[in-house]
């Protein structure tokens, strides 16, 4: 499981077995998002053509040297699929 993605998510106590003994679990119902005014605050940006076959994680690695930043690029560009 990709634990880095969930490491900053809040934890909640949830009684899974309904036996009054809750377990601490990750709240996966939280959504990650970028504030609407954040894009306006960016000082600069650059346009770049992405090849159809290039996966988001490979794009992130080739530009930033890290595959974990692909979700930021996708959110800033409003790509949800």
Image (cartoon, helix red, strand yellow):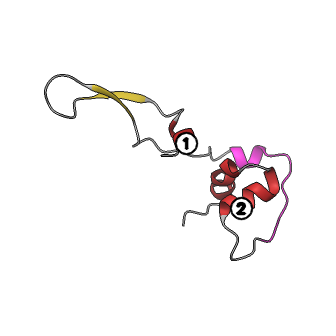
In the image, 76 versus 27, the foreground residue is 27
Please rate how many residues cluster around mark 1, counting C-alpha atoms within 10 Å: few if below 14, some from 14 to 19, many from 20.
Answer: few
Looking at the picture, does residue 31 appear above or below residue 21?
below
In the image, 17 versus 44, the foreground residue is 17
Q: Is mark 1 on a helix, strand or loop?
A: helix
- Tell me if 75 is positioned left or right of 64 in this view: left
Quadrant of the image occupied by residue 35: top right
Start and end of the magenta stretch? 38-49
Whether 39 is among the magenta residues is yes
- Tell me if 40 is positioned left or right of 23 in this view: right
Please rate how many residues cluster around mark 2, counting C-alpha atoms within 10 Å: few if below 14, some from 14 to 19, many from 20.
Answer: some
Q: Which mark is residue 58?
A: 2
Q: Is mark 2 on a helix, strand or loop?
A: helix
Looking at the picture, does residue 40 appear above or below residue 19?
below
Looking at the picture, does residue 34 appear above or below residue 22?
below
In the image, 26 versus 34, the foreground residue is 26
Residue 44 location (% of width, % of height): 86, 51
Q: Which residue is found at the position 77% from the left and 43% from the top? A: 41
Q: Which residue is found at the position 54% from the left and 32% from the top? A: 8
Residue 38 location (% of width, % of height): 70, 44
Question: Does label 1 or label 2 sit earlier along the sequence?
Answer: 1
Q: Do the residues labelled 1 and 2 touch (CB within 8 Å)?
A: no
Residue 36 location (% of width, % of height): 63, 47
Q: Which residue is found at the position 44% from the left and 41% from the top? A: 30
Q: Look at the image and tell me in which quarter the C terminus lies.
A: bottom right
Q: Which mark is residue 5?
A: 1
Whether 26 is among the magenta residues is no
Looking at the picture, does residue 33 appear above or below residue 73?
above
Q: Which mark is residue 69?
A: none
From mark 1 to mark 2, how far is it between C-alphas?
17 Å
């Amino acid at each position: 499981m990709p634990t880095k993605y969930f490491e900053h998510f809040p934890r909640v106590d949830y009684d899974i077995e309904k036996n009054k003994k809750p377990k601490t679990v990750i709240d996966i119902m939280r959504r990650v998002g970028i504030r609407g005014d954040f894009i306006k605050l960016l000082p600069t940006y650059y346009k770049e053509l992405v090849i159809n076959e290039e996966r988001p994680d490979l794009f992130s690695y080739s530009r930033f040297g890290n595959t974990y930043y692909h979700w930021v690029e996708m959110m800033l560009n409003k790509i949800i699929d």
